[in-house]
Amino acid sequence: MNNTLIIGQYVPGNSLVHKLDPRTKITLIFFFVFIVFLANNVVSYSILALFALASMVTSRVPIRFIMKGLTPVWFLIVFTFILHIIVTKEGTVWLEIYSFQIYSGGVFQGIAISLRFFLLILITSLLTLTTTPIEITDAIEDMLHPLKKVKFPVHELALMMSISLRFIPTLMQETEKISKAQASRGVDFRTGSIKDRAKAVVPLLIPLFVSAFKRAEELAMAMEARGYKGGEGRTKLRELKINARDIAVYLLFIAVIAGLLLTRGY
Amino acid sequence: MDITFNNVSYIYQENSPFAHKAIEDLNFHIPSGSFVAVIGHTGSGKSTLIQHLNGLAMPSRGEVTIGDFHLKAKEKPKNMRELRSKVGVVFQYPEHQLFEETVVKDIAFGPENFGVEKAVIEERIRDIIPAVGLSEDILERSPFDLSGGQMRRVAIAGVMAVQPEVLVLDEPTAGLDPRGQKEILQMFYELHKRQGLTTILVTHSMEDALKYADHVLIMNKGKKYMEGNPVEVFTQKDALHKVQLDVPESVAFLSKFEKRFKYSLPFKGQTVDEMAEDIRRVVQGGRIDE
Ligand SMILES: Nc1ncnc2c1ncn2[C@@H]1O[C@H](COP(=O)(O)OP(=O)(O)O)[C@@H](O)[C@H]1O
Ligand SMILES: [Mg+2]
């Protein structure tokens, strides 16, 4: 059905960004978080913005989706901007409203910090928009692999993650079905006092838990019946593979870092 | 209650790239007291259709009228609760909606929500328990300790205890053993007759539709594909095959009979016994329309 909608915010596609190895994407984002702080003048910020913009365009994710992902943080971005304008008292006074002065430094600082924030969120949301949760889990399992040496249960953790992700849509469908059934029996989830509404949740939660436990038991049985006994010696259906395009993107990224180092003011 | 669909379309996730038209330009009328079978391939929009009958889904376009209730896009009727008390819906796998500690509490849950008095509820439960084929001694048990078939019956009892005027059944016998299927459908049919209900049955079984319905609605890809009385609809083999539906066994039998014996016995909705009688007459050289 339309699982794509329900699993996080993944937008299916066939772009270069979609096809990149998820490990590449995670690694790049990890470093992007650091290099964002390298930028400190117009040119270096432009390089960062250009990189983010280019990733966005190549991903061919409709702009609406990206904006939707940003809605919860707009407030934070605007708030940061205003805070800087009020607090920073550097540079020349640009504007004076009664006894309150707005300094050029405040405006620059405000723009710079908000832009940083904006770029970070843009790039990270691009990861979840172009990578299925299963790919992300696979990548994390692979990247955490060295931790196995210290007996960290990497495989089990990844399995738990993928099973949870796999059953999110199922649970959502079930929630919808059961709430419709109970609504038909006269439960009103929308109106009434807080207490009434809390009570209305019981006929929804109990069937959900019952079926979740039942499903977990069935799943465990099915896995054992098919010979599952932990991660030892298990092969993978989806092998992660670093391709030429990943190398190319790494090189591009290194070029961006070099560009930043060269153009930033010290 | 009369039910009318007037140019109804329903779109899931409208205004998003995942928008999906589940029902398109649907028009039909169901007079009060009919038994209607809704048939169609999986995904043809049957479940979406029936959710319009008690306002779980509001039409994206067009209008649904149920008795005095009007459902239009973005126009929720104020008396939704009353509508839901008059239209009972038995969903697919209704046992998933059980949640109370005891069977009796679960059956009483619906009527309580609709403000039926305690004494009246008790009386209704006493009536409904044998009608759905359960025995009184399970009333105090937990619904989760029952067998699948018993759970299904408890859930059905919970819907029937509201005493709706319109009964909507979404594949109510899916996943039951053949005998249970027969018993439950027979039970619905008797309730339909006895209480003068308007019944809408979603089913995959042509045989059941033929046996119980007086009106058949065939859905295909969200649109009405065919509509009419069962005999009329079920004799159109080619049209049904086109949408991956089969004719009922008795119709299939008659067309095989014709091929084999070069003798055409018309189908007019006869039962297996009546059909055997027809054949006996033919074999003995008589005419069937005597
Ligand atoms: N909650 C939903 N969200 C999005 N699409 C849905 C939802 N429920 C059903 N659909 C889609 O609507 C169409 C009709 O579904 P449904 O009414 O359940 O068909 P049926 O009951 O005939 O199998 C299907 O293509 C289905 O994928
Ligand atoms: Mg259905």
Image: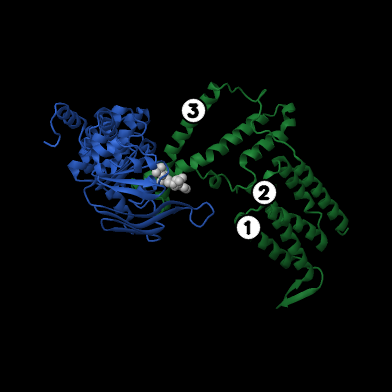
Chain colours: A green, B blue
Question: Please, what is the three-letter code of the amino acid marked with disc 1?
Answer: Ile
Q: Say whether mark 2 is within 8 Å of ligand 1.
A: no
The kind of secondary structure element at disc 3 is helix
Q: Nearer the viewer, mark 2 or mark 3?
A: 2
Looking at this view, name the residue that lies furthest to the left.
Answer: B290
Looking at marks 1 and 2 on the same chain, the residue that comes earlier in the sequence is marked by 2
C-alpha gap between disc 2 and disc 3: 38 Å
Judged by depth in the image, the label closer to the viewer, 1 or 2, is: 2
Among numbered discs 2 and 3, the one appearing first in the sequence: 2
Which label belongs to residue A63? 1
Q: Amino acid at mark 2?
A: Ser
Are tags 1 and 2 found on a single chain?
yes
Pick the front one: B65 or B81: B65
User: How far across and how far down the image is residue A150, in percent?
Assistant: 74, 27
Task: Indicate left or right for B182 with A135 as reference.
Answer: left
Query: Is residue A47 toward the left or the right of residue A197 in the image?
Result: right
The spot of residue B213 in percent (x, y) is 25, 42
| Parent chain of label 2 | A
- Badge number at residue A218: 3
- Name which quarter of the figure residue B134 lies in: top left
Decide: marks 1, 2 in contact (CB < 8 A)?
Answer: no
Q: Are marks 2 and 3 on the same chain?
A: yes
